[in-house]
Each structure stands twice: as structure tokens, then as C-alpha cells.
Amino acid sequence: MAFAPSCHVVHCRRHSVTASPAPAPWIYVQVTIGKGLGMELVLTALFVFVVFAATDQTRGATTPHIPTLAPFAIGIAVFLAHIVAVPVDGTSINPARSFGTAVTAGVWKDHWVFWVGPLVGGAAVGILYEMFAYKALSYVGPLEGDNGHRQRAGSSPAGPQEFAV
């Protein structure tokens, strides 16, 4: 998805047309690599947590407004991540976005930060969400156990789930 706009930026630069100032994220001169990596890691972790919490089928089964507001919550998380990190490193929070723009613009300086930060942050939140936030108990129907008994929910929010309410 980021590839087409990046190609447009490269085309505009070749033909001396003014385009966006930063086609690919990079660590700015006054920012250390550690700060950039930390920013990407933390903001991606917060973004992935919001996505997990907003799309969790277990929570959505007991709270009907959560699935309705999920796109709004995810959009606000992306907006806030960009507001915070654009002045620091151009904001990635998505390795695919960084890769597409880096390929078309040819900017590879400190590119590993925009892969390691989001991948480690997302993986850490995935593990922590599974361990802590997903411990909610729910009533299960005949597909997961006897009626009326309480058990832990079946699988992660990304996997298939069946719940009886």
C-alpha cells in the first residue's frame, strides 16, 4: 500500500516537482539510534495493544459497543503515534510501510530500526496480551464444555473462537 505513493514521490523528484519532504522514515540527526528504536518499539507496542483490545472477540461478546468503536480506537492510536514520533524519526510502526518507501526512495540509513522496533514491540505485546489481558473467563456452551461451567476462553484474539452467551 505504501509502494504506490512512494513511486509517485520518486517520479515527482525525477521531474523536479515538489513532493512530500520525507519519502521514507529515518533517524534525524539530533536523535540517537537508541531513542529512535525505543520510540518505534513503544509506539508499535501501544498500537498493537489497542488493536488486540479493540478486536478481542471475548470482550466484544460481553460489551456490544467495542466492535463498533474498534476502527475509531485504532485510528486514534495511529494518529497519536504519528503526532508523537514524526518529529523524532518520521514514524513507521509498520515495517511494510518503511520497506516500500525505502525501496522507491533508496534511503536505507538506519533502516533496521524500522524493522526491529515494530517487530519486537508487536511480538512483546502479543505475548503479554495472551498472558495477562486475555485471562478473562467466559461462560461456555456445549462446544467448549458443559453448560453452566466457567472455563478459560479458547484461543488468542487472532484465532478462531466460539462462545455461547
Image (cartoon, rainbow, N blue to C red):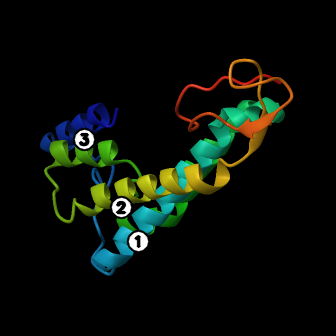
Callout 1 amino acid = Gly
The mark nearer the N terminus, 2 or 1, is 1
Q: How many angstroms separate mark 2 from mark 1 (CA)?
A: 7 Å
Disc number for residue 117: 2
Q: How many angstroms separate mark 3 from mark 1 (CA)?
A: 22 Å
In the displayed structure, 163 sits above or below 137; it is above
Callout 2 amino acid = Gly
In the displayed structure, 101 sits above or below 69; it is below
Q: How many marks?
A: 3
10 and 2: which one is in front? 2
Using residue 71 as the reference point, say whether residue 136 is left or right of it. Answer: right
In the displayed structure, 90 sits above or below 7; it is below
The mark nearer the N terminus, 3 or 2, is 3
**Image coordinates for residue 108, horizontal then vertical, percent:** 16, 57
In the displayed structure, 118 sits above or below 155; it is below
User: Crowding at label 1, few (<14), some or many (≥20) Cα neighbours within 10 Å?
Assistant: some
At x 13%, y 42%, the residue is 14
**Image coordinates for residue 23, horizontal then vertical, percent:** 28, 50
Using residue 137 as the reference point, say whether residue 22 is left or right of it. Answer: left
* Element under disc 3: helix
Marks 2 and 1 close (CB-CB < 8 Å): yes
Location of residue 27 by image quarter: bottom left
Q: Nearer the viewer, mark 3 or mark 1?
A: 1
**Image coordinates for residue 116, horizontal then vertical, percent:** 30, 59
Disc number for residue 100: 3
Location of residue 39 by image quarter: bottom left
Callout 3 amino acid = Gly
> Does residue 66 show up?
no
Q: Quadrant of the C terminus?
A: top right
* Element under disc 2: helix
Q: Nearer the viewer, mark 3 or mark 2?
A: 2
* Element under disc 1: helix
